[in-house]
Image: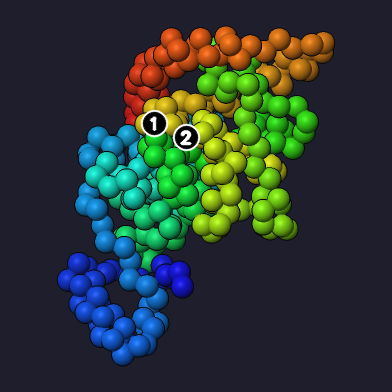
Amino acid sequence: MRRDSSVVTGVTRREFLAGSLVAASWTALGAAWPIMGQPPPVSAGPGAPELVDDLVAANRILAQEGVVDAFGHVSARHDRDPNRFFLSRSLAPALVTRDDLLEYDLDGNAVNANGRSQYLERFIHGEVYRARPDVRAVVHAHAASIVPFGVSTVPLRPVFHMAAFIGDSVPIFDIRKTAGMTNMLVIDSARGRALAQALASKPAVLMRGHGVTVVGRSLPFAVGRSIYLELNARVQLQAIALGGPVTYLDPAEAQKVMDAGENGSYERPWELWKRKALAK
Ligand SMILES: [Zn+2]
């Protein structure tokens, strides 16, 4: 049974430990955990201050650069425990502060929700972290420019060097194939697992009729890729609109760009984006 966050309020460590003893006695009696559902997972401790600062910045940057609006979210894997990650409570990314960040286990259970509402699609993050040990940051967005490539026969391909990480194309996740008729959202671990399977070892996966999920080995990589993927989509649509054949980066060219270092590890733009986002 999945824990209902709405009934978990203000649980301190002492109360939690006391609850654990109660749970043990209930288990001994062969009874289910009463009313509250499962106890919350134990925290792995606070995240590194620079990681927390960067996650707040990542939220603001994605809003500032038009990748997310009121919807969409970004997470970072915990620096102390690979089975935990940080993600804001349900909130528009432009408004996220340090106090809004929740710690989750990979099943999408919050350590410290304390009754705060949570993103329905947090399962995207947990299942991608479970499937991809190399990933330390995940972005989920509904950017309008990307949606056409998830619903048409035209693949999203790199039109310029800044999006060379696309390689030959981006896979498409069609939720209908594994979950039938749904509300289109990744609202449980099974749907999250199917999405992670479609992502495979790629940097991004389009979500048919919905949006995109982008991953990276750090927040600058996941955020930078999200920004340049969205820009590539717009430029590709413009190139197609001009008419005539479009010359994309050859996969061999894309590989050479990657071999030379992907966009300088996003260090220069990250410094710029972060300063602009946090100055507001
Ligand atoms: Zn979504």
Question: Is the CB of the residue bearing disc 1 within 8 angstroms of ligand 1?
Answer: no
**Distance of label 1 from label 2 (alpha carbons):** 7 Å
The vertical placement of 11 against 89, above or below, is: below
Of residue 193 and residue 240, the one placed in the foreground of this image is 193
Horizontal placement of 249 versus 43: left or right? right
Q: Quick check: can you spot residue 70?
A: no
Of residue 226 and residue 132, the one placed in the foreground of this image is 132
User: On residue 16, which mark appears?
Assistant: none
Q: Position of residue 22 (x, y in %)?
A: 25, 82
Q: In which quarter of the image is the C terminus?
A: top left
Secondary structure, mark 2, is strand
* Quarter of the figure with residue 10: bottom left
Q: Where is residue 202 in the image (x, y as percent from the top left)?
A: 53, 31
Q: Quick check: can you spot residue 168?
A: yes
Q: Alpha-carbon neighbours of circle 2 within 10 Å: few (<14), some, or many (≥20)?
A: many
Amino acid type at mark 1: Arg
Q: Alpha-carbon neighbours of circle 1 within 10 Å: few (<14), some, or many (≥20)?
A: some
Secondary structure, mark 1, is loop
Residue with the mark numbered 1: 217
The vertical placement of 8 against 189, above or below, is: below
Q: Name the residue at 75% across, 27% down.
A: 154
The vertical placement of 261 against 2, above or below, is: above
Residue with the mark numbered 2: 215
* Quarter of the figure with residue 78: top left
Of residue 113 and residue 93, the one placed in the foreground of this image is 113
